[in-house]
């Protein structure tokens, strides 16, 4: 057993990629800073040189486009956006260029770039320092989107993303950085597009995304104490996502609750529920439900933040209502 | 004057004629309804693509925009594959997924042309960064129009390229119009080359209809880039003869004045270089033979395109993602 934090697992993935592959370099704002990216890039610039760990000008658009151009020309860059909100300034490079590159040129060239976007919420940071925008990118053909919830996946998915050969948006959440778990020392990959069953159960399927998956695992413990056995699936990749694993679970449990760190309307939870309705409606004994953020920008004041964000208790309550009453009031409130 | 320069000029002339004849035929096919993809014709601007590409090696990278038939041809892209792409055929350089505005020929360094204005400016800088990190002597060229200078990422990228001394050439083809809007309807000052010094690189304004002047400026910029001294900006002043898109001249629609075109037609870059070549001893007969050979070559490319199959509709979703194995 070797315990590593989520942040240190990300750092180790970077270090191993940089050590083993000369094509890999990292560019982004704050990479030489002691606070922009937590400890996830600590001392990599001294270990691998500032020509490969590039702390960039305040130019999201240019640095992302530059990394994509380098990828097209044979490199395997990782772009880091310390706050996902700021990444919107690079949307042309990600959506119009990287995502379309393979298709437009008939697969003769691709843009094997990793765009690492960090979700950094809470702490009264408000609307422009808190957003989880993964659903926007998951909508785009040609992009893959991964959202690790554990230290093991944080390392393995970053390595898989670099070697996928396609543009991958890798989203990590600062609320997970201190979580620790056993992480193998070797350089390993976690397959993109495969979810993981975190707890087995027969009463309800709870699909969680990123931090919400970690909270769903906690919720399952509470539910078990109340006699409800939840099957928690950590989706890990949201584009492509493991519909086979989710559908087969729903066919056993008959109930579906999806919990996502993003907003409700047009979100990933809606996509999963729509797919479940298309493929497993006959097996469902209760209407599907979701626990997400409300359709509201992130507030600042503590009193508002407390009602904005949810945790294991809200997930457990929604699951319990689904199992006991066949419906959840929480999703109605959230509308 | 030496034999090498004469050979460079002959090669530029050949490419300019190849571009002109191809574009005239594309215009005719657009008018005939044979081509559906939006075509932004390069007629009148040939000296820029030919002059810059003559200063490059096969390995150097070229990136373009929506008006890039000329860049593809001048860098040595296969003419049949380009025309077939414009005709939407499976044999096209992008197998019917790209059309006129998305061209690709990596075998000669054309890493992509796309119509999002200014989009390939940071991409070109990125390819230059790749070359620099690998220790190669390659340069990367971004061709863009005067409209692209109004985009924010152009300025972000110029700063970044100068800061990191990336081997990139920013080639602005100032044809005085962005779509229907004249330069001074969009800029407070007619001073594009001057933005270079603000961003920390040399900038020059060149007669973009003088292929020899473009070539010489591109050689200086490419040498500088290869020596590790960083990027340069070339503002090549020229004029597109046809309208923004399609075969029309944009005169009858109230967009441009006829007298403006009348001023530019006599500055046609092709007869200008042809006259220079004859002055330097090239035989008229040899140039006429070259013209005829290119006519045949272009005719063959159009025949190839017209007789090629369309993509199989069953392969609509092919190439959304690339399949790779292991750590390749």
Image (spheres, rainbow, N blue to C red):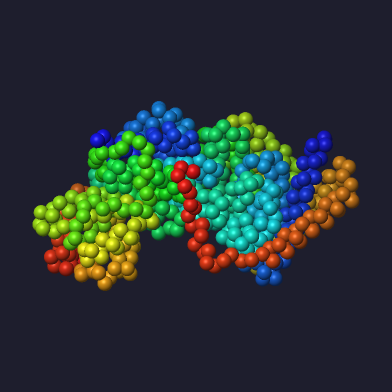
**Which image quadrant for residue A44?**
top left
> In the rendered picture of this protein, how many numbered marks are placed on residues?
0
Q: Is residue A70 left or right of residue A46?
A: right
For residue B145, say whether it is visible.
no
Which residue of the protein is positioned furthest toward the left in this rendering?
A: A226
Say above or below: A96 vs B55.
Answer: below
Q: Residue at x 34, y 41 (%)?
A: A155
Name the one closer to the observer, A310 or B98: B98
For residue A112, say whether it is visible.
yes
Name the one closer to the observer, A312 or B252: A312
In the picture, the quarter occupied by the N terminus of chain A is: top left
Name the one closer to the observer, B308 or B227: B308
Q: Residue at x 67, y 42 (%)?
A: B58
Q: Is residue A146 left or right of residue B102?
A: left
**Which image quadrant for residue A327?**
bottom left
**Which image quadrant for residue A271?**
bottom left
Say above or below: A88 vs A29.
Answer: below
Q: Residue at x 18, y 62 (%)?
A: A203
| x then y, percent, for residue B283 | 89, 47
| x then y, percent, for residue A59 | 45, 42
In the picture, the quarter occupied by the C terminus of chain A is: bottom left
| x then y, percent, for residue A300 | 24, 49
Q: Residue at x 67, y 51 (%)?
A: B77
| x then y, percent, for residue A191 | 37, 49
Say above or below: A259 vs A154.
Answer: below
């Amino acid at each position: 057993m070797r315990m590593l934090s989520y942040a240190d697992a990300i750092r180790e993935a970077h270090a191993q990629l940089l050590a083993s592959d000369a094509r890999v370099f990292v560019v982004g704002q704050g990479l030489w800073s002691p606070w922009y990216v937590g400890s996830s890039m600590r001392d990599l610039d001294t270990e691998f040189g500032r020509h490969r760990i590039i702390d960039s000008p305040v130019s999201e658009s240019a640095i992302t486009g530059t990394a994509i151009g380098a990828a097209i020309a044979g490199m395997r860059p990782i772009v880091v956006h310390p706050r996902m909100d700021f990444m919107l300034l690079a949307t042309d490079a990600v959506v119009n260029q990287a995502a379309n590159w393979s298709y437009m040129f008939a697969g003769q060239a691709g843009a094997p770039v990793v765009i690492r976007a960090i979700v950094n919420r809470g702490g009264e940071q408000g609307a422009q320092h808190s957003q989880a925008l993964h659903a926007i990118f998951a909508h785009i053909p040609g992009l893959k989107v991964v959202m690790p919830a554990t230290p093991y996946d944080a390392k393995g998915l970053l390595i898989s993303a670099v070697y996928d050969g396609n543009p991958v948006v890798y989203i990590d959440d600062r609320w997970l950085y201190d979580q620790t778990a056993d992480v193998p020392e070797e350089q390993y990959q976690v397959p993109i597009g495969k979810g993981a069953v975190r707890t087995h159960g027969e009463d309800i399927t709870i699909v969680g995304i990123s931090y919400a998956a970690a909270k769903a695992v906690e919720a399952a413990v509470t539910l078990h104490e109340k006699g409800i056995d939840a099957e928690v699936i950590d989706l890990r990749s949201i584009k492509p996502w493991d519909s086979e694993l989710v559908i087969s679970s729903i066919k056993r449990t008959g109930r579906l609750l999806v919990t996502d760190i993003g907003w409700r309307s047009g979100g990933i939870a809606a996509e999963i529920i729509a797919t479940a309705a298309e493929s497993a409606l006959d097996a469902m004994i209760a209407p599907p439900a979701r626990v997400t953020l409300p359709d509201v920008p992130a507030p600042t004041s503590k009193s508002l933040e407390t009602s904005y964000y949810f945790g294991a208790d809200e997930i457990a309550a929604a699951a319990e209502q689904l199992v006991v009453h066949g419906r959840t009031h929480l999703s109605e409130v959230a509308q | 004057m030496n034999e090498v320069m004469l050979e460079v000029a002959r090669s530029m002339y050949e490419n300019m004629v190849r571009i002109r004849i191809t574009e005239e035929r594309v215009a005719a096919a657009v008018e005939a309804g044979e081509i559906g993809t939006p075509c932004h014709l390069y007629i009148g601007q040939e000296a820029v693509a030919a002059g810059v590409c003559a200063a490059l090696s096969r390995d150097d990278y070229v990136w373009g925009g929506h008006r890039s038939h000329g860049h593809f041809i001048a860098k040595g892209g296969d003419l049949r594959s380009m025309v077939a792409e414009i005709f939407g055929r499976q044999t096209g350089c992008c197998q019917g997924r790209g059309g006129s505005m998305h061209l690709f020929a990596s075998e000669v360094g054309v890493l992509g042309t796309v119509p999002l204005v200014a989009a390939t400016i940071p991409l070109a800088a990125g390819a230059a960064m790749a070359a620099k990190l690998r220790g190669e002597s390659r340069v990367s060229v971004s061709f863009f129009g005067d409209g692209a200078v109004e985009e924010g990422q152009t300025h972000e990228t110029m700063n970044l390229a100068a800061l990191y001394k990336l081997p990139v050439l920013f080639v602005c083809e100032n044809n005085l119009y962005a779509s229907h809007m004249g330069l001074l309807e969009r800029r407070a000052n007619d001073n594009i080359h001057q933005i270079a010094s603000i961003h920390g690189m040399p900038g020059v304004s060149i007669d973009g209809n003088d292929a020899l002047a473009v070539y010489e400026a591109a050689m200086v910029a490419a040498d500088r880039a290869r020596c590790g001294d960083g990027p340069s900006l070339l503002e090549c002043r020229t004029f597109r003869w046809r309208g923004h898109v399609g075969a029309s001249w944009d005169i009858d629609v109230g967009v441009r004045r006829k007298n403006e075109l009348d001023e530019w037609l006599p500055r046609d870059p092709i007869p200008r270089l042809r006259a220079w070549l004859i002055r330097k001893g090239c035989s008229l007969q040899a140039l006429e033979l070259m013209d005829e050979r290119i006519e045949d070559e272009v005719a063959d490319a159009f025949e190839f395109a017209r007789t090629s199959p369309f993509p199989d509709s069953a392969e609509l979703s092919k190439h959304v993602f690339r399949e790779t194995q292991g750590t390749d």
